[in-house]
């Protein structure tokens, strides 16, 4: 790695096609408390939490392979003390001597933490002012105003961070992170009340052909319009999210297997009959799964994925429930 990159004001690592770290700069090592020999040659998953490993496999890897870049990816890495450190990551995939390499840039999300520390400091000052009210009343008033201002800033920052972390940048609909939280919430409700729910895994048929024929800008336009169509066509209580690439998911609360497959087939027809802004025709394949007592977060997603695979193998532009795959 070039000397100026070694000392860059952001963390930099390079990953080979096997996911192993080949280069790392001093800023990253300083932030995380590692020596270079403790990082080089290690698989990137060594430094990821269990949840982040899933996000990397299900969103980061498919996106970087399809588009060559990933922007504003929220990720937590583990430092040498075993602590989780939040970052925003941008990545780019390129070929070096015929071998794919991924360069990753990390920016620490410290601003929010700094604001919270400053607020705590102001609160301590307020407590001290209370003890000597008569002598410091004017200062106390000033501190109150400052606390209110900082609280407003933190609330606004929290709203922005929450929206950023839960919204897909391209389509402006909920992203995988939001979907994961919704899935956990419905699983917990099922555990407490036995409230059934189903999933629709929606994948665009021959999307690579759309990109190859019309270009990625048209492909992005198709993704945006499909997100709008799905959102408009489902019920108000349903939740549509983009998993990544051309794959979307719909959570159907209080929906059994029969109702879910009926809804999926209706969406097949809606998409097929939609007038698309940039292409003549589009279809989707849909895999359907319904949560049961024996399911986990992994199995319900795997069931929908297997059903989707069967729908693709059955000629596309159709919907198949996992029960039909068994």
Image (cartoon, rainbow, N blue to C red):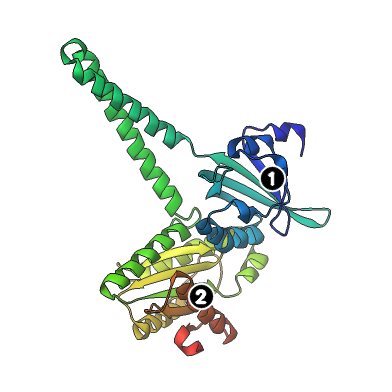
Q: Residue furthest right?
A: 97
Residue 187 appears left or right of 215: left
Residue 120 higher or lower than 262, as above or below:
above
Q: Residue at x 37, y 83 (%)?
A: 257
Asked which quadrant contains residue 255, the reply is bottom left
Measured as percent of width and height from the top left, residue 227 is found at 45, 64
Residue 50 appears left or right of 238: right
Measured as percent of width and height from the top left, residue 46 is found at 62, 54
Residue 319 appears left or right of 37: left
Q: Residue furthest top?
A: 135
Tag 2 or tag 1, which sits nearer the N-term? 1
Q: If the image is split into quadrants, where does the N terminus sit?
A: top right
Residue 57 higher or lower than 86, as above or below:
below
Disc 1 residue crowd, few under 14, some 14–19, many 20+, Cα 10 Å: few
Q: Give the camera-side residue of 133 and 206.
A: 133
Residue beneath disc 1: 38
Q: Give the camera-side residue of 50 and 16.
A: 50
Asked which quadrant contains residue 147, the reply is top left
Measured as percent of width and height from the top left, residue 319 is found at 47, 83
Mark closer to the observer (1, 2):
1
Q: Residue at x 62, y 34 (%)?
A: 30
Q: Residue at x 31, y 25 (%)?
A: 122
Measured as percent of width and height from the top left, residue 69 is found at 63, 53
Q: Compute the Cα span from label 1 to label 2.
A: 35 Å
Residue 201 appears left or right of 193: right
Q: Residue at x 45, y 50 (%)?
A: 165
């Amino acid at each position: 790695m070039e000397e100026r990159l070694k000392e860059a004001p952001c963390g930099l690592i390079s990953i080979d096609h096997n996911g192993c770290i080949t280069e790392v700069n001093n800023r990253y090592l300083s932030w995380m408390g590692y020596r270079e020999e403790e990082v080089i040659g290690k698989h990137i998953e060594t430094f990821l939490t269990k949840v982040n490993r899933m996000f990397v496999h299900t969103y980061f890897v498919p996106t970087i392979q399809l588009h060559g870049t990933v922007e504003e990816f929220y990720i937590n890495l583990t430092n040498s003390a075993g602590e989780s450190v939040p970052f925003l990551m941008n990545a780019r995939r390129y070929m070096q001597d015929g071998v794919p390499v991924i360069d990753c840039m990390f920016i620490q999300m410290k601003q929010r933490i700094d604001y919270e520390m400053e607020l705590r400091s102001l609160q301590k000052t307020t407590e001290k002012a209370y003890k000597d009210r008569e002598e410091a009343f004017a200062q106390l008033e000033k501190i109150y105003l400052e606390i209110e201002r900082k609280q407003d800033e933190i609330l606004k920052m929290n709203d922005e961070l929450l929206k950023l972390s839960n919204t897909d940048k391209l389509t402006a609909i909920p992203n995988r992170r939001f979907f994961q939280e919704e899935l956990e919430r419905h699983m917990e409700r099922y555990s407490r009340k036995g409230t059934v729910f189903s999933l629709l895994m929606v994948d665009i048929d021959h999307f690579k052909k759309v990109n190859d024929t019309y270009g990625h800008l048209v492909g992005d336009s198709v993704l945006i319009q499909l997100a709008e169509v799905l959102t408009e066509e489902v019920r108000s209580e349903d939740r549509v999210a983009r998993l990544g690439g051309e794959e979307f998911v719909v959570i159907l609360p209080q929906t059994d297997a029969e109702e879910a497959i009926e809804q999926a087939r209706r969406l097949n027809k809606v998409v097929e009959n939609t007038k698309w802004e940039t292409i003549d025709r589009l279809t989707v394949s849909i895999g359907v799964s319904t949560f049961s007592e024996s399911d986990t977060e992994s199995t319900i997603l795997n069931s929908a994925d297997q059903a989707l695979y069967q729908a693709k193998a059955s000629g596309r532009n159709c919907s198949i429930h996992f029960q039909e795959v068994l």
